[in-house]
Structures are given as C-alpha cells and as structure tokens.
Amino acid sequence: MAAGIYAGIDIGSLSSEALLLGQDGVLAYSIMSTGANPRRAARKCLEEALAKAVLDEKAISAVVATGYGRIRVPFADREVTEITCHARGAHFLFPRTRTVIDIGGQDSKVITLDEQGRVSDFVMNDKCAAGTGRFLEVMAAALETELTDMGRRSLHAKRGVSISSMCTVFAESEVISLIAEGYGEGEIVRGLHEAICRRIFSMTRRLRVREEITLSGGVAKNQGISETLKALFGMRINVPEEPQIVGALGAALYARDMEFKEG
Ligand SMILES: Nc1ncnc2c1ncn2[C@@H]1O[C@H](COP(=O)(O)OP(=O)(O)OP(=O)(O)O)[C@@H](O)[C@H]1O
Ligand SMILES: [Mg+2]
C-alpha cells in the first residue's frame, strides 16, 4: 500500500479548489476565486491547502488537475476532465449516486453514472449563463441582495413569480420590472430558482436520470435550488457538506490511482 499524499486541483471559470487526500481521507482543502490568472490561482490554492494540513509540497506523491483551466497547472502530473472528476468525487461521497448535477459559475452539467461510478452519459449547457451561478449573481446584484442569502429568502416565499426570460440580460430587466410592480424579493428569487431548475430538468430529457442524485458545484449551497430540484425530479438528492470541492476530490482520487498503477 502506498502511504502518500495526493492532490486534486480544480480550476473553474469562477473559483479554484485544491484538495489534499491522505490515507485516511481528506486532509485539507482550499477554495478561492480564479481571477484573471488561473496559473497563479492554482499555486495559491495548493499552498493554502498545504498550510492548512501543515505539510510540505514534497510530501505530495501525485497531482491531477481538472476544470476548464486544467491545462494551466504546470505542476500537475496529469489532467482529467471535469465530467469524469465530478462523477468520481460524487460517487466516493455517496456510493449510490447514479446522477450528478453540477451547477458551476459558467456552465451546468448533468452526468449519469453506472454502478461503479463510471460516466455513462452527460449533457452540458455552456452556451449561455442561464442555469448557472453567474445568472444568480447578476440577479442578486439587481435585487441588491446577498447571493448567500437567496436560498433562505426563497424558502420563506409561498410561491414563485413566473419569470419568462432565461436570457440573463432580459431576465435582469424583468426582475427590475417585477420589483417596480411591488413583488416581494422572496417571490422573485423563488421564481428565478424555479426557472433555473426547470431549465436543468429539461436538459435531462434525453438522459436516463436515476436515483440517487448528487449535487456538486457552488450553486448547490443554495438551498432554494436543491429543494426545487428535489421537487422537480421527485427523487432523493444528496448535497455534500462542501459541494464546491467534489471535482477536486475526484481529481485527487485519480492522483491516488496513478501511484497505484505506477507502482
Ligand atoms: N454560499 C453560496 N451560496 C450560493 N451560491 C454560491 C455560494 N458559494 C458559491 N456560490 C455560487 O457558486 C458559483 C461558483 O460555483 P463553482 O465554484 O462550482 O464554479 P466553477 O467551478 O468556477 O465554474 P465552472 O464549473 O462553470 O467552470 C458562483 O457563481 C456562485 O453563484
Ligand atoms: Mg466547476
């Protein structure tokens, strides 16, 4: 048995994560914004995780990078796609996962898995901000509310206002009009969550979605989103304690495989 430390680095369009995996599980992780320099974000993230674990970089046996910026991680031994890493990470946390819904800053994906946790199929929306964290960030600014507070506010509303446009620019104007018409913030936010979730649900039409569903990506921290998805899919939905590190966890598990394979 190898007794190494393995690192997974996920360079997303909005945020970057580094996760250190030891023999007994996750040792430490860090999350920060990617900014304009993914290479620097990767380095800073790794350093922060190492500092938290009180470890030196030399202790790391293998590094796997994932996310859209994975080719910008010069110290990575290997790159693995996001789809594969999210599937692996979600299956590790919840072994009965057969579907992963990853809602990130700039895209959203639905991935189906076989019993072993291997990817069998996926659909992805990366053409526009609709159905992503970025969409909610723009709406939070229009409503002058905190992004982290949107979930709680929407859960207090009795119903959601119908939002007809999914284009971020038009939906923003619609939200401004709804505020002027006197609709409450909670109702508007709930309507936005319903619009995003319906869009994700319709993306899955050609997939075979099976229980259990596991969420990943930063938007899963919004309880309004997870509750709406649960109602739409009518299935059990797992929300990891820290959904933003699922991809980095999957990458670290692939780093661990490398050492096993290479002896
Ligand atoms: N506490 C929170 N509450 C609600 N939303 C959050 C919270 N933290 C992060 N988010 C949302 O998560 C999004 C970022 O998610 P994530 O880190 O998964 O994206 P990413 O991996 O950088 O993007 P992508 O996968 O599209 O490249 C942000 O747009 C933000 O809307
Ligand atoms: Mg991501």
Image (cartoon, rainbow, N blue to C red):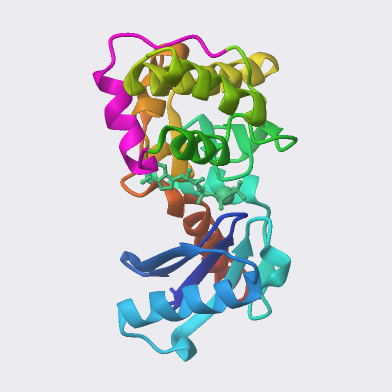
Q: Is residue 62 left or right of residue 169?
A: left
The C terminus: image quadrant: bottom right
Q: Seen in the image, is 49 located left or right of residue 210?
A: left
Is 125 drawn above or below residue 24 in the view shown?
above
Is residue 94 something that shows in the picture?
no
Nearest to the observer: residue 179 or residue 233: 179
Answer with the quarter of the image where residue 28 lies: bottom left
- The residue nearer to you, when weighing 140 against 148, is 140
Can the viewer see residue 246 in this picture?
yes
Q: Residue 69's quadrant in the figure?
A: bottom right
Give residue 55's position: percent from left, percent from top. 36, 85
Is 184 above or below relative to 79?
Answer: above
Q: Nearer the viewer, residue 113 or 243?
A: 243
Specify the farthest residue to the left. 156
Q: Residue at x 67, y 58 (%)?
A: 80
The image quadrant that residue 120 belongs to is: top right
